[in-house]
Amino acid sequence: PAPAAPAAAPAGGESVAFADEAGVTVTTTVSVEAVVEVEERRDLDAFQAPPPARLLTAATVGDHDRRGNYLSYLARHAYEAQRLGLDMGRRQRFVVTDLQGSPLREADLVVEGPAGRVVGKTHGDGRWDYFPGLAGQRAQGPALVTVRAGGATQRLQVQLPAQGDGPDVVVRLPVQPPGRAQRLDLAFLIDVTGSMEDELRYVNQEVVGIVERIRGAHPEVAVRVGAVFYRDRSDREPLQRIRLTRDAQGFAQAMRGVHASGGGDYPEDLHAGLETAVRGLRWRADAARVLVVIADAPPQRYPTRFGHREAMLEASARGIRLLPVAASGADREVEFLFRAMATATGTPYVYLTDDSGVGNRHMEADTDRVAVEYFHDALTRLIRSELLGEGMHEPPGFG
């Protein structure tokens, strides 16, 4: 069957008004739960204090920075790599700057070689990491690379590695750096099946707090927020969506109305969620683009034209940072997939830990060292560092 289309808001959703980019008031329907269930649960929630906005704890693993550590991890997990069909063992890093060495964000790159044509876009730190194994086994040997930014174009020949990593390629263009991003599109892709029930209420509250904190710290940045919630194809509401909006209050209200339900078996329809988030949300050009993926289960093996590999390639091409967060119950397959998604788009792998005492048992990452911090602080720090053009890394002084 064809991949699931982005979900239209069902009858009984919530209407949220917000101003679009032209300042015109628009009303959109935010899909949450069925009307009766929402009303009943809100009555119950009225007697409960919301969870604190800074309680969950998390650790980060910066595989894109600690490349040797990540290659050792890949060698230990050949089974997961084969099962997921992901070859992350080769990397070609491009760094695009102006003539003085300042990073150029939003630079477009095109790699043309034996495996065909692959496109990419630099992030705030001017980097783009190309993984030949994602493009195909034949992606090795000579390739023509075209780099464009600020009206300038440069072409060069690059030797793509047959194994391991190629040397970093630094491209300097005679243009003015565009400065820090003045717009942020921040979206969340969240598994809302029954297994997420132990943490979802806390996650939703903290997501709202993170958005508020970023908006407060960067009043000069035009922030839009949105979310996609996914379950499984057999569930009553397999996909729900909050379109990217500047209405932070409407977003918060809709987030708090989403509750865990459905599922049944362990894998869920992550692929449909990724397609809806990457392709179904209207990401702005020239904005810092971050998609936070929060889940505890691997994807179902439904036939699809858009799986995790396609999501990684398209996010890399469009400059969308995939920032994965593993919740309680995640296994080694989830860890491998999430670490690959993070590495492909230059972010660290994040996982919730037992330190908060919230939720079921959390699996520790297979790595040599981690730093634990509040989940709220970790995500705020990572997103703010992207806005500042510093990239996303482990806590300062740790990596």
Image (spheres, grey):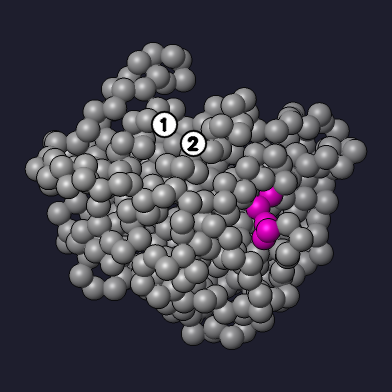
Residue closest to the eye, 208 or 247: 208
Which three-letter amino acid code belongs to the residue tagged 2?
A: Glu
Can you tell which mark lies on residue 212?
2
Any magenta on residue 308? no
Q: Position of residue 104 (x, y in %)?
A: 75, 39
> In front of the other: label 2 or label 1?
2
- Residue 188 in view (yes/no): no
Q: Tell me the CA gap for discs 2 and 1.
A: 8 Å
Q: Is residue 213 left or right of residue 144?
A: left
Tag 2 near tag 1, CB within 8 Å: yes
Residue 90 vertical placement versus 27 (above, below): below
Q: Position of residue 331 (x, y in %)?
A: 42, 77
Residue reaching furthest left?
Answer: 36
Q: Position of residue 309 (x, y in %)?
A: 48, 62
Which three-letter amino acid code belongs to the residue tagged 1?
A: Ala
Q: Residue at position x 46%, y 59% from top? A: 56
Q: Is tag 2's residue or tag 1's residue first in the polypeptide sequence?
A: 2
Residue 225 vertical placement versus 70 (above, below): above
